[in-house]
């Protein structure tokens, strides 16, 4: 697997569009082999990742392949190997993808570049779901700012929508990332895009969904249980269902209100109550109370989101 990742990383580090596209496809092929229910040998896996366009078209013609269940993924040796490799700096896929995104932004806006950005965003989402500890990247301002930059009006609606989904994926079960998002005026970015008359309707719907998600109760990202010395450090910091199945089974503002009714400063990773987040969002949006009331009555997302 190290060889496959090395090939993909070499292409992702390029400034040449076709090479970046090839690297993204190689990463996609690796993730697909982990997530799809297909019995393949190591040789088959390698061949699929470096496949030609003709091979890809033949696979598409064969019809969709069923997804593995959560239990099947956690017991898959390929997933176990992938997860362990992600714990180190050298082989972390999410890090390489966000660095690729940074270079793509510097290339400027054009049709082919937009497609590469969307592909990279989708892969970032997938990697964070397969390896939740990689979400920690977005507790750093430089990477959170990258997502906020992609929400600027200059980008096409498809990129904006995909960025909102990526942002939600990065914030789930990770209050520390949410505090970084808030500290960088992420709420202002979201609400400004929502109020912009030029923003596409589909994007506005995604933004409303994001606001519902943001107002949901938070869960701590660090479990209270004692650490297991046999588990990787990053894994111990993730309470996700996938991480539990696998093991067998920058500055925020408010943790409470001060005497003036305004939120007090909170440390990294601390959770906020729904009322505190409502107050923060209320600085930028006048209809927050209606959103909260609707949230309480209809309980979207199953009623609980971390």
Image (tube, helix red, strand yellow):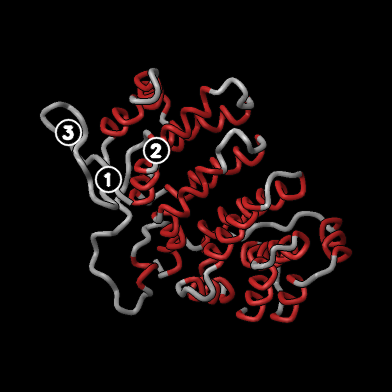
Quadrant for residue 225, please give it.
bottom left
Verify CB contact (< 8 Å) between mark 3 and mark 2: no
Q: Secondary structure at mark 2?
A: loop
* Direction left: furthest residue: 259
Residue density around tag 3, few if under 14, some if 14–19, many if 20 or more, within 10 Å: some
Residue at 33% from the left image edge and 46% from the top image edge: 179
Disc count in the image? 3
Quarter of the N terminus within the rendering: bottom right
Instruction: Indicate which disc, 1 or 3, sits on the residue closer to the N terminus.
Output: 3
Find residue 271 and name its label: 1
Q: Which mark is residue 286?
A: none
Residue 162, given in percent of the width and then of the height, sits at 60, 43
Pointer 1 or 2: first along the chain = 2
Residue 185: image tag: 2
Which residue occupies the foreground of this view, 220 or 251?
251
* In the displayed structure image, the side of residue 296 where residue 120 appears, left or right: right
Q: Which secondary structure, mark 3? A: loop
Residue 76 percent across, percent down from the top left: 57, 72
Q: Which mark is residue 257?
A: 3
Q: Residue at the location (62% across, 67% down)?
A: 34
Residue 37 shows in this picture = no
Name the foreground residue: 84 vs 142. Answer: 142
Residue 182: percent from left, percent from top: 36, 41
Label 1: few (<14), some (14–19) or many (≥20) C-alpha neighbours in 10 Å: many
The residue positioned 60% from the left and 38% from the top of the image is 161
| CA gap, disc 1 and disc 3 | 13 Å
Marks 3 and 2, the one that precedes in the sequence: 2
The relative height of residue 43 versus residue 238 in the rendered view (above or below) is: below
Query: Is 187 displayed left or right of 201 in the figure?
Result: left
Return the residue nearer the eye: 238 or 265: 265
């Amino acid at each position: 697997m190290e060889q496959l990742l090395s090939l993909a990383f070499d292409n992702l580090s390029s400034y040449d569009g076709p090479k970046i596209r090839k690297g993204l496809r190689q990463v996609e092929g690796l993730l697909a082999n982990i997530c799809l229910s297909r019995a393949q040998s190591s040789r088959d896996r390698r061949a699929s990742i470096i496949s030609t366009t003709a091979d890809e078209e033949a696979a598409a013609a064969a019809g969709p392949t069923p997804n593995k269940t959560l239990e099947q993924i956690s017991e898959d040796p390929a997933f176990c190997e992938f997860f362990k490799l992600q714990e180190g700096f050298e082989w972390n896929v999410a890090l390489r993808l966000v660095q690729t995104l940074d270079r793509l932004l510097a290339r400027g806006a054009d049709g082919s570049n937009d497609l590469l950005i969307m592909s990279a965003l989708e892969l970032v989402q997938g990697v964070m779901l397969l390896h939740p500890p990689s979400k920690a990247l977005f507790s750093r301002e430089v990477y959170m700012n990258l997502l906020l930059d992609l929400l600027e009006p200059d980008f096409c609606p498809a990129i904006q929508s995909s960025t909102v989904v990526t942002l939600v994926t990065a914030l789930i079960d990770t209050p520390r990332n949410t505090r970084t998002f808030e500290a960088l005026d992420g709420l202002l970015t979201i609400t400004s895009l929502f109020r912009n008359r030029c923003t596409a309707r589909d994007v506005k719907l995604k933004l409303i969904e994001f606001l519902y998600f943001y107002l949901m109760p938070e869960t701590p990202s660090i479990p209270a249980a004692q650490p297991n010395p046999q588990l990787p450090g990053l894994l111990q910091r993730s309470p996700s269902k996938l991480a539990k199945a696998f093991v067998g089974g920058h500055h925020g503002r408010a943790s409470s209100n001060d005497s003036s009714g305004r939120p007090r400063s909170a440390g990294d990773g601390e959770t906020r109550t729904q009322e505190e987040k409502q107050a923060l969002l209320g600085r930028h949006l006048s209809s927050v109370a209606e959103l909260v009331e609707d949230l309480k009555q209809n309980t979207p997302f199953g009623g609980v989101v971390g």
